[in-house]
Amino acid sequence: MSMEYITIKELIQVFLAYMFSVYCVPAFVFHKLLHKKSLSYKFIVYTLIGNFYMINIVFLIFLLHISGKLSLYLFTVVPITIGWLKINKPQIKRFFTLFATTFSRLFLGETKIRTILDLLFYQPKKIIKTEIRAIFSHIVHHFIEWGMLAGLLSFDLWYYGYQTVTKYVYGTSDIVVHHEWINQMDEHVIFYNGIYPFGFHNVIYFLHNIFGISILSIMRVFGVVSTLFIYIMLYLLLRKVCRSRYLPIFGVFIFTLPHIFNFQGTMRYQWSLPQEFAMVFLYPCAYFLIQFFERKKKELITEKELKTKNKLYTWIAQYSVRPSTRSLIFCGMSFSMTLAVHFYITIIAIFLLLAIFLAYFPIGFYYRYFLPIAAAALLSVFSAVLPLGIGYLQGTDMEGSLRWALNTMSSGSEEDSDAETDNEPTSDTGNDDTKKNVDQKSKQAKNNQNISAKTKSPDAKENDSFWAGVSRKLSEKWESASQYADSFFQKAKKKVKKFNQKAGAVLEDVYDLPEMIQPLLLSLEALSAVLILFIVIRRLFYYRNLLGICIYMFFMVMLMCAPAFSLPAVMDGARARLFLTYATPLYATCLVDIAYAILCRPFRYHRFTEILPIGLTAALVYLTITNHMVKPLNIIYALQLPGEMECNYRIMNEYPDKSWTIVTTTNSYALIRQRGWLYETCSFLEKMDDYTKNKQITIPSKYVFFYIEKYPVDYGSFNLVTEPVNTSEYVSETAAMEKAEYQGGSVYSTMNRYILESKLFYWAKAFEIEYPREFQVYYEDDQFICYRIIQNEYHLYNFAINYKYNNQ
Amino acid sequence: MTITRSSFVVISITMLTILFLFQFSNLSSMYTSRATNNNSQQQTEYLHANETVQHTDLMSTSSYTTAIIGDDLNIETSIAKEWCVYVKRTYCEYKDLQTFLNKLSQHCKFVILGADAVSTQSEIDILKEITDLGINIIFTSIPDSSLIESSDTLQQILGIKRIISKNFYTNGMTLFEGFLLGGKTTYHKLKTHVPYFELRSGTKTYAVGEVKGQKAKKIKNEELPPLIWRTYFNNSFILAANGEFFEDHTGLGILTSMLSETDDYFIYPIVNAQSVVCQNYPYLSNENSPEMSKHYYHSTKSFCENVLWPDFAQILDHTGDKFTGMIAPKFEYSHSEEKILAESIDYYFRQSEKISGELGISGDQMESKNFYTKKLKEDSKVLKKYLPNYAFKVFSPGKMPEEIYKDYIGKKNRDTILSDIHTILLSKETEKKPILSFYNEDILSVTGTIDGFSHTDEEDLYLRSIETALGYSAATLDFTKVVYPTSIQDDWTELSRNFSRYLSTYWMEFRNAFDQVTISNADIKARRFLALTYNSFRRDNTITLSISNFQNEASFILNLSNEQISSISGGTFLKIEDDKYLIAASEKDIVIRLATDVK
């Protein structure tokens, strides 16, 4: 079975397992509560509940020190069953009574088997029938929507799945670290390297243990699955804020198809990483906060109305939890999940929520709004930090990267001040500006004084006529006001232009179309102004929502450009770029939507008007394709050769666990650790250096595999995913003759790796001569070769031989 | 309740019918039995010696592939020559290495030599020269330790890093999996004096000696005294046996295994026959009855028919083995008044026929040498009388000297029970004789390989070796000790239990892999084996085997190295153990396709 086929199979498996966990199971439990809600609402709620449960149940079993498959099954199945019984009240007792009665009547000849079968399958048949009908009905009624969305998501599936399907290997080195942490969870150790938001790891652990899919399989493809969810969340948020039904697809299109963004803005979606997984929960925060404001407003109006009619208590009694509170709970839930999965997303979530909160100014400050929001924020932070806190109290130190991040944040001001001093030209420029401003103001003050001095003397001369004086005074006032307004406008225009220029220079790292940067910034400013105007005029929440997106976009721009404006950098540019990239389609769609809202208002947003967004998206798709503007496939870091991953798979499938050892670099360590052993190339070769006949290297396992890169990997470099992985030249005797480094963090970096692989290659050639029957090629491609030797476990081979290049 | 007359008639007829139906099969088999009549059966076409490959066909001075260095009288040399016949390798025998080098054939691939062949520096230099030419060397025994110690070259050739002890008494021996058939085993009782070497890297060890107190002395497994190993020097493989493996036919299997360790595949022909032979059973008289009655509460005749036979038949039925009985008409020909019993003849021939067995004639008697001739004459007279239409094909002389039976065996004109003999089954003790050889142009001589009532470490090693080399075994059970017990160990309960457990444990693997046949069938298979020649070559993952002088069937063992057979045409295959396959050829051209072995 080819690796491509295996990868596709695993992708389907993981997708189904994840969908089952985050959609089907919550749907099974909560469908009665949500059956009247829209599909998009159900999807987002189920996804949040599913993920929240998975993350926290794993935390729970680990912090109670009862981790393992059994507890996981127990803590999953029992609460699900109880929840289902509580919510759906299936009247099991009644069912069994009926069943027993019917069954006993069967023996009396009063009923037929068919009746019993009907009784048994009535409910399942009904549910399946209804669901199928609902799905078909939904597809028929939303055919264009589904079709377009499916088309775009299929492209994403191909785009982000291409690397893992064709190259098989991990695309970035971080994944290996996370893989190892999940391996440790299998050995009942959470927070292996210290306290870290383990939400992502918990989800992988959950899927691995519940569905029996190997961690390696999940880690290779989970990034693609979570990316699809990221795209869907973008679509769902747009559905929430946009007036048009079809413009959200335009947003998905912007993020999917055209070559607008720098490749680094989307490259990480190919890989299974916590930060990217946490992005799934970013937009649901906004979705539910917006929904909270909407619901709360409705509730307050209803409350007011019913209070006057003295029917308030009847209305309150129908809710155990009010809809607005529910929204806030889900908002808090998604926020806590960002915190539980990756802190960076929490920072972005704070910006997003703050942006929406600001857009709802001053409503948000009204205590009926503010207090629940504050409480939700506290609770969500508490729920996310609690497991980490317990872990910390149990004696686990903080993980290195977390400590670094916290230090950076706490000492951020110092570094920023350092940055300021370092960036002297920038701060000088800033100081110059300030100086100029100060100068201009003082000059203006002087002018004003002069003007008033000048005007004073004619006043004294012409104070005999009152009306003349009044009119003169008025005209003077108008003149000065208009002058002030003019200068203010000029200054603002100048400042905006300057801001745009500065930001534009930075944003060239984000967008691959430099000509669109200035229009984008200008439109952002203009749209914000227009929206504020609309909010003042029309007071609709729709405009507030769009303003919230605009503010969020502005925050993201500032996050990216912070160093350029001498502002403290919350995160480095590379990460900020990701979030700005993700915010852009959101903003762009809002921009188009406001145009749609204005243009189509006369038509009352009739279904007919939806032709515009559909046409726009379709036309842009066509133009993108015909103008060859489709974004090219992304990059991959050279960490491993595809052959190595294929060998890992083959060995794991073909040989009993723990009966084999691979001799290779450290890259495969986390991947195979649960199934076999790894002997490092460095240790292997080092032990053979300065060969004497007393040297002895034995590897105590029946099967030993030697991974040799004929073209050693140019470690850490990157290239297009469509091209072969970056490598050095073919191994050479010259390199084998050189002295290799065996210690240190860069032993497997390009040059030393080349020497090591050359040495190992020539060792293999020499060893093959002595053991031609036993030392066999197990796998070979153009770049990689794997030798296998089967050992007599009672009498191991001595692998130390004189291969000519170990006698420096 | 009364029974009417008509009902009575119906019930009676029904009962009679049932009785008839039950008895019919027995009666019919009695009347149609050919147990005592094999003259009218279709005569089997036996291959004659001149139709088979013999030493003379393989000896060559110009195009030999194997050179055997050593004295002609040396047992190691004769074993090597016998092995060449079995694996159909052309060979040439030389007294010393210098002569061999002078007459070196370009086809030569192997040199087999013993310790005596290397005693001087010049001979060591020749060895080095041989390795330069890429000719593999097999040491059937290790040269003198002092010579090894004094010569770095010889140490390098043999892959020896250093000599730990020149004379070390091992505490047993471990034979590793994959060398001889039968898997890994440790022989605690195979203790011997051998030089104790430490081997360099690049060697592969197949057998090691055990060291007493290994753990206490902190000796690693890899540091145990090597007994059989392979190393690579210059361009050649060097295979060495450090011990007395070539003192008997044990060397055959070791040679085969050594040869297979030098190539990525090795295919060689085998006999593919496993037999169980009862020496001196069936017993047709009633001698020693008083003693037997004391012990078993049965007369000898009754014991043999009512205890021995059912027990034995059941054991064979359980393991699927075929019965070959060597009839002992009597044991005492001087004074015993007991006669050869006609009813016993009838009983055993019928029983044997029922289990598709075979009956031959034994040469044993309990008295002095002088009575062997009398025995032959008396047996011939009585058996000819009772079995006029039965020709004995198999003869097991037992302790009868060759000079006695040679005048009768195969001599039609002497009209004795030995006139029609085709197969002589020699006992294992006559191990100087080849395992399979022609006694004369018509008669094949085969030897027993194991004592069915005994299983020692030495016997196990011997059996594994013969099974590896030939896929042949003949377990011989001498029933004399049952009829004339001398100690408590001769008690049938003990003996039958031993035999039964050996068959179903130690020997089971071989019985599962190879055909279980009577000696006559083994004879036919052996003749076919001796007759064939073969040629094989490998291209990529396909091995092509061509058999010449193919006679209906042929069997081979294919040794692979971490590969497996994916398909075969022209025959069938059976996995014996990892990397070892039995190939049963049904056509003379066989194509075997291989795939990487997956564990």
Image (spheres, grey):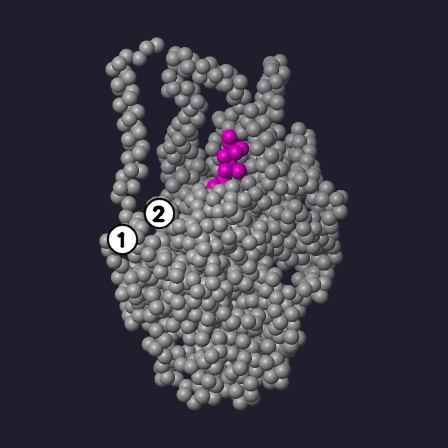
**Left or right position of A319 against B133:** right
Look at 48% across and 62% down and name the residue there: B464
Q: Secondary structure at mark 1?
A: loop
Specify the amino acid type for callout 1: Asn
* Residue B228 x, y percent position in the rendering: 55, 70
B31 or A495: nearer the eye? B31
Depth check, front residue: A610 or A320? A320
Question: In whole angstroms, how far apart are the C-alphas of marks 1 and 2?
Answer: 15 Å
Residue plotted at (73% across, 48% down): A396
Q: What main secondary structure does the magenta stretch of the protein show?
A: helix
Q: Which residue is mark 2?
A: B342
In percent of width and height, residue B448 lies at 44, 61
Crowding near the residue tagged with mark 1, few <14, some 14–19, many ≥20 C-alpha atoms within 10 Å: some
> Label for residue B389?
1
Q: Magenta stretch: give its range.
A: A15-28
Residue A25 lies in the magenta stretch: yes
For the point 48% across and 47% down, which residue is it?
B289
Instruction: Give the foreground label among 1 and 2.
Output: 2
Q: Is residue B387 visible?
A: yes
Q: Chain of mark 1?
A: B
Residue ranking furthest to the top: B1
Q: Position of residue A421 (x, y in %)?
A: 72, 63
Determine whether A572 is above or below B302 in the image: below
